Amino acid sequence: MSEDATDAAGADGTNATNGPAWTRITLEDVHAVDFEVPIASSRAADCTTLADRYQAALESLTSEGDARQTPAWRVFHFLTAVLTMYYRPDQPNSPYGPCFQWSDGSRTAIPSDFRAHCDVLATLATRASHPVLRARLSDVAWLLDRTQGHLALAAVDAYTDVIELSERDELMHRGASEPGAFHHDAVIYLRRALQLGRAVGWEKPPVARAKAVLVRLRERAVAAMEHAAIRWLSTVDLDFAVSDPAAIGASITSVLRDSNASFFLLARVELWRLAARAYGAAKNDDAKHHALGEAAECLVVHALAQTDSATLRAHFLSNAIAALHGIPGKKARRNELRHQLIHVQASVPDEMGVFSETINLQPFIDEVLPLVETGDALDHLLLIARLGRSPVQAELEQEARRSVAEHPLLSLFGGAHLDRHGKVVARTSPAGGADRVDASVVQAQIARSEAIRRQIVMQGRVEPVLRAVRDRHFISDETFVLLLQQSPAVPDDLLGTIARGLACFVQGDRVGATYILTPLLEAILRYILQNQGDDVTKFDDATETQQDWTLSRLFQERRTELEAVLGVDLTADLDRIFLQRPGPSLRHAVAHGLLHDADPYGSDAMYGCWLLYCLCVIPLIRHTAALRAALGGALA
C-alpha cells in the first residue's frame, strides 16, 4: 500500500487532519532536492517501475534515520503518489483514479488531491528529464489547471518521446518480452497524447509529431504483420481520424489477403471487423459488407473446427449468423447456417447436462497466493474462476433446518427485514415447529449464513488472488475480448461490454464491474438457454407481440432448464444473490439505484460479479490446452 494511504491512517505518526507527508511539500523542497536521482538509470517506460524506484529511495532514507521531516522525504512521497494513480484511457475527462479504494471510503491519491500543489507539479514537470515522469507531471498539472496549455503540449511531447525511445530500444515497456513500440502501453501513450492534442490544438507541432508517430507505427505494424499492434494502432487512428479510413481498411485487407499472414481465426475476425469499420467511415458500403461477410465466414470455419464440443460449435455458428445480419445478399447463407445450428444444438444437451466443475478448494485455501507465482495470464484468469464453488443447495437447507431446531427462539415469531432507510423489504413467517419449518424461515437462515460465507470467500480467497494478478499482468478489455470469444456463455453482440465488466472486476473497479455486469446476467442466461434450443420469449395473444423473458420470469418459468445447464447449486446461488429477499437482491438494487457508494466494495456485490465471471469462464477450463493453442500466446 502506498504511503499516501498509510499516512492518512496515521502510520507515520501524523493524524488524518495533517494528511500524508507529500501534502506538506513546498517549492523550496523541490529546489532543494535532486528529485531524479532515484530514477536516473531507469530505462522503464512505465510509471509503476518509477514509483517502485521512489519507494525504494524512501526505504533507504528511513534506514538512515528519521528522515520523515526532510525535503527529500516529502518530494519522493509526492512523486510516488503522482506516479501510482491508476490511468483510465477510456475516460479522457477523468483519466486518473485511485490505485486502491477500500469499503470504508479510504483510498490512494487522485488528481484533485494535488489541486493545492499545481505550482509544485508545474515546476517538477519543467525540470524533469525522464520522459515518463515528465509526461505524467505535465499531464496532471494541465488537468488541474486548463489555462496552462503549454503543459499539455509538453505532455504530448513527452508521451511521444517515450514511444520513440522505445522504438530505439532506449526505453523498455513493463512486462514486454522484447524491446520496441509494439506494446499496449505505447498505444495508451499515443491515445492520451492525441486526447490532449484535441483539447489544446490539433494542428500544433507536438500534436502533429504524435500523429506522425501513430501513422508510422501503424504502417510498420502492417508491414511486420503484427496483428495485435495492427488492431491497437488502427483503432486509435480511426478514433481520432488521423489517416484516410479507406487507406486503413485497404491496409488491413492487404494483410489478411497475404498468404504469409498466419493469424489465428479469431484474430482474423477482429481484423475484418476493423476493416469494415474503416470502410464504413470511408462510406464504402460494398467493401464494408464484404469485410463483415469475411468475418462471419471466419467464425463459421472456427465453429466447424470445434469437433470436440457441440456447445462451442453452436456458439460460433450463432455468432456467424448474427454477423451476417444486415448484409445484402446473405439471406440464403444465413438460412443454411441456421439449419447447421439446429443440427448441432441437438447434441448440446448431452454435453451441457450439468454446468459445473468439481474442484478441491483446500489447496486454494491453504496456498492460494503461491499458485499465482507460477503460470501465465491465462492460467491466472482461469484460476480466479476456480477459487470456490456454489454451496450444495440441499446441504444449505438441511443446515438451516438444523439451526432453526437448535435455536427455536430465533424464529419463534415472524420477522420483518428492513433496508437502510427503514422500509420493510421482506417478511419471514414464524417457524411453525421443528417438523414443519416455514420455507421463508429456511430462506432467511440461509441468507444469514451465506452472507458470512461470501465474505470469507471474497476477502479470504478471491481478493488476494485478484491483487496478485493485477501486480503480475496488464489485464485490459482486450484481454477479455480475446478470452471470451471462446466462451459459450457470452453473446457475440455483448462481447465488448461483458469484457469491459470483467476487466473492471479484475482491475479492482468495483463500481464499474457491479453496474456493468449485474444487468447482463439476464442476457447471458437467455443466450445459454437459446443455445440449447429453448424458447426464451413469451407471446402475448391479445397484442400479438413477443417479448423476451425477464430475469425473474426466467427463474420462475425456466428454472428446470437453467438447473439442467448450470446445475441446481449454481442456479440457486444466482437466485440468492441477484433476486431473493431477504438477501442482497443485487439485480433490483442496481436497476433501481438502491445501492449506496460503499455497496459495490462489499462482499455481496463482489460475489455477484465473481459468479458472473465464473459463468463466463468456467466452461473454458476443461478446454485450457485448446484455448492456449487458439490464442497463440496472446494472453501470455
Image (cartoon, rainbow, N blue to C red):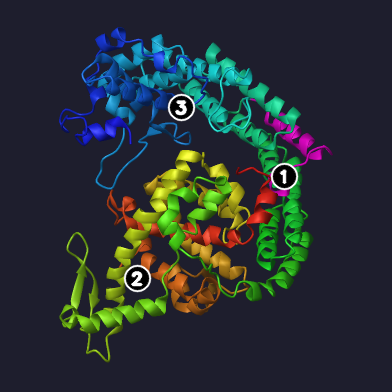
Which residue in the protein does label 2 denote? 580
Which residue in the protein does label 3 denote? 49
Q: Which residue type carries mark 3?
A: Thr
Farthest bottom residue in view: 435
Q: Which residue type carries mark 2?
A: Gln
Nearest the viewer among 146 and 397 is 397
Task: Judge from the rendering whether residue 383 lies leftward or rightward of residue 482; answer left or right.
Answer: left
Q: Which residue type carries mark 1?
A: Arg
Nearest the viewer among 228 and 172 is 172
Judged from the image, the secondary structure of the residue bearing numbered disc 1 is helix
Q: Earlier in the sequence, mark 2 or mark 3?
A: 3
Which residue is located at x 70 percent, y 29 percent?
221
Above/below status of 538 relative to 139: below
Q: Which residues are magenta?
A: 243-268
Above/below status of 286 relative to 541: above
Locate the N terminus by quadrant: top left
Residue 474: image location, x then y, percent: 51, 38
Q: Is residue 262 magenta?
A: yes
Which residue in the protein does label 1 denote? 268
* 2 or 3: mark nearer the eye: 3
Residue 497: image location, x then y, percent: 52, 50
